[in-house]
Image: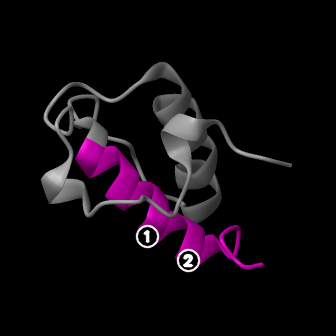
Amino acid sequence: MATPDDVTPQAEKPTDEWVTGDEPMTGPQHSYLQTLAQEAGEDVPGDLTKAAASEMIDRLQRSTGRGAS
């Protein structure tokens, strides 16, 4: 199943170079994070930025195995 563009694990630029990286995470990011965090037994902070959410998605994908090809 493909993920929405907002939560694609492989960003073209590092998250610290994103122009909109300091904006609040998107709805699709939050939804996907909730799924990953539930599987990993973690909580999702509600105040994540787009960049921080992307980094958390990457980490949780690795820990849950969802990011494996």
Q: Give the main secondary structure, helix, strand or loop, of the magenta stretch.
A: helix
Secondary structure category for the residue under label 2: helix
Label ID, residue 62? 2
Residue shown at 71% from the left, 79% from the top:
68
The relative height of residue 44 versus residue 14 in the rendered view (above or below) is: above
Residue shown at 34% from the left, 46% from the top:
53
Q: Amino acid at mark 1?
A: Arg
Label ID, residue 59? 1
Residue shown at 31% from the left, 60% from the top:
13
Disc 1 to disc 2: CB gap under 8 Å? yes
Q: Is residue 65 magenta?
A: yes
Q: Position of residue 52 (x, y in %)?
A: 25, 49
Q: Is residue 34 visible?
A: no
Looking at the rendering, the stretch of residues picked out in magenta corresponds to 51-69
Q: Position of residue 7 (x, y in %)?
A: 53, 44
Report the front residue among 58 and 60. Answer: 58
Residue 47 appears in which quarter of the rendering? top left
The relative height of residue 38 versus residue 62 in the rendered view (above or below) is: above
The relative height of residue 64 versus residue 42 in the rendered view (above or below) is: below
What's the CA distance linking mark 1 and mark 2? Answer: 5 Å
The relative height of residue 42 versus residue 33 in the rendered view (above or below) is: below
Instruction: Locate the C terminus and report the quarter of the image it occupies.
Output: bottom right
